[in-house]
Image (cartoon, helix red, strand yellow):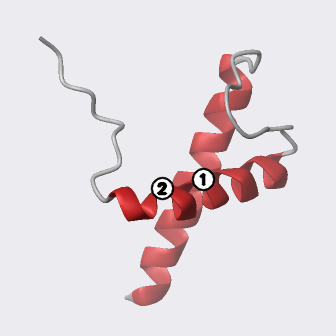
Amino acid sequence: MSKKSNRINVPEARAAMDKFKMEAASEVGVNLKDGYNGELSSREAGSIGGQMVKKMIESYEKSL
């Protein structure tokens, strides 16, 4: 049985992650709505995830 790897380990962090995702989506110009976004293309969804990772790396580098 496969284990999901995209679960949030700290349930209290869900609201912050949702806000972060919405900010990243607006930065790359993708119209993301609350709830189900099944109409997004793989390219759009990937650009949101890529922007989130980019911002996390920048934040980490600033903390060094």
Relative image position of residue 42 (x, y in whole percent): 65, 19
Distance in Å between CA atoms under marks 2 and 1: 6 Å
Relative image position of residue 63 (x, y in whole percent): 42, 88
Q: Type of residue at label 2?
A: Arg
| Label placed on residue 36 | none
Label 2 packing within 10 angstroms: few (<14), some (14-19), many (20+): few
Taking the view exactly as shown, the residue that stands out farthest to the left is 1
Label 1 packing within 10 angstroms: few (<14), some (14-19), many (20+): few
Residue at image position (79%, 38%) is 33
Relative image position of residue 23 (x, y in whole percent): 74, 59
Question: Would you place residue 18 above or below residue 38 in this image?
Answer: below
Q: On the image, numbered disc 1 is attached to which residue? A: 18
Question: Would you place residue 6 above or below residue 16 in this image?
Answer: above
Assign the C terminus to one quadrant of the image: bottom left
Mark 1, secondary structure of its residue:
helix
Q: Are marks 2 and 1 in contact (CB under 8 Å)?
A: yes
Taking the view exactly as shown, the residue that stands out farthest to the top is 1
Q: Type of residue at label 1?
A: Asp
Q: Quadrant of residue 47?
A: top right
